[in-house]
Amino acid sequence: MNTYDFLVIGSGISGLNFALDAAEYGTVAIVTKKELMESNSNYAQGGIAAVLDSHDSFNAHVADTLTAGCHINDLNAVTLMITHAPAQIQKLIDIGVGFSRKKETLSLTQEGGHSTRRIAHAHDATGKEIERALIFHVRQHKNIHIFESHLAIDLMVKNNACQGAQVLNTEKKIIETFLAKATILASGGAGQVFERNCNPSVATGDGIAMAARAGAEIRDMEFIQFHPTALALDGKPTFLLSETIRGEGAILVNAKGERFMESQHELKEMAPRDIVARAIYEEMKHGPVYLDITHRESAYIKARFPYIYEQLWWYGIKMDKDRIPVAPAAHYTCGGVHTNLHGETNIPGLFAFGEVAHTGVHGANRLASNSLLECMVFSEQTVPTAVAYATTHPIEEQTTTNNVVYVPSNIANIKKEIQHLMWNHVGIIRHEDELDETLHTIKDIQSNLETLQKNGRDEMLIETKNLADVAIIITKAAIARKESIGCHFIEN
Ligand code: SIN
């Protein structure tokens, strides 16, 4: 049995940031189902939003966040996040994050929904650079113990308090118990619920599914953000094409070469994501849609977007010469495990932050580059609360027996079926009758998976059951929300 003060499930930016701070007060275990670096954060291209320019203001950043979120955001959460943003950028610089600079000052880029340039970035691979710096420090801290290839199965809740988790060691194929005074969900979102998504394979909504099974309150799951521009090339990955490409002048054109966003929104390609995603989706009924930045200088494109340029080159596209075929893809889970501003959930001993969590900061649609910011701010806000909890709540004596055994499954087809159903019927444009029918079908799938897991589980079954659980939560939330707002669009 492994016993720690803090158990962090997930190794994205929020989990690593929390671990570093909390390790000053006690022992920390980080369990992560692949390698430490493999998380949604690692693939964040755009950047991290903060008021860093004298022409900008907290009020403007708040206003943009509320506009994107359709004003159903929690204003306290938004204000807290935005006023803490500049200090978080400084903290990242202090730990060695190499943000792109123009001479001495940070280079600020633009993304959809922002009224000004306020995105600090590390070229076009900001998440990777922040992860690199955090991991460097995490690996050196004597109080932090890293468990890669460890997939959390379920939270251990005893006497209405969370005391750790049961975890599958996917290399040894054994189930292990991790006991902790405070358990922290930092396990990211659920983009893999949808067939077309630009998330890494790890984004299967495990934290949301586990928390829901344990009785945590889950909110706003109908708000799945579809990124407007992911690569749409047969046989190639749904590779994200950062909004910062449009921020630096790229336009969207249809098969006839017409710039169709001009007639859709005053901000054109820089309109909030839900608007651009739906416009592309509609335009694609008549033919392919392309992202075009060929009017900018080749040297500039290669220097500003080195990662994207190289990836596209491997896929046979020269970004400085060719138009890039694009289509929307599931990108970000705006809802999640409900917490207050200090990461506390309704289950004592269970904390959450980052994409797995719901503070209300995003409302009905997240503003670009507020997600890495959310990770930094709310993980830091959670440290004092979790430390206070761990100090006053010793681990109760456990008589836990592992009730899970490892049995290989072969159910890739079921995963694909869930993803296909969700993309086609609970996607960018939703219809009430289809939502009802899909809920019914996925409940049947969930029940089959429950029967299967009575014999034992492997990583595929655990993740697929989590996908089914989260798909049901999303679909129920979409059925309950009758009006179209933000990322949730109902057509009757
Ligand atoms: C992007 O670079 O377009 C993604 C950034 C984000 O989702 O905030």
Image: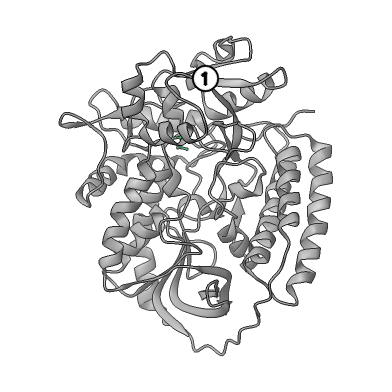
In the picture provided, is 435 more to the left or to the right than 200? Answer: right
Q: Nearer the viewer, residue 218 or 71?
A: 218
**Res. 100 image quadrant:** top left
Residue 307 x, y percent position in the rendering: 39, 37
The three-letter amino acid code for the residue at tag 1 is Arg
In the picture provided, is 225 more to the left or to the right than 475? Answer: left
Residue 195 x, y percent position in the rendering: 67, 43
Element at label 1? loop
Residue linked to disc 1: 323
Q: Is residue 192 above or below residue 107?
A: below
**Res. 481 image quadrant:** top right
Q: Nearer the viewer, residue 88 or 361?
A: 88
Q: Residue at x 30, y 33 (%)?
A: 51
Q: Is residue 487 above or below residue 173?
A: above
Q: Is residue 433 above or below residue 444?
A: above
In the picture provided, is 213 more to the left or to the right than 122? Answer: right
Q: Residue at x 45, y 34 (%)?
A: 368
Kindly tell me whether residue 322 is visible in this rendering.
yes
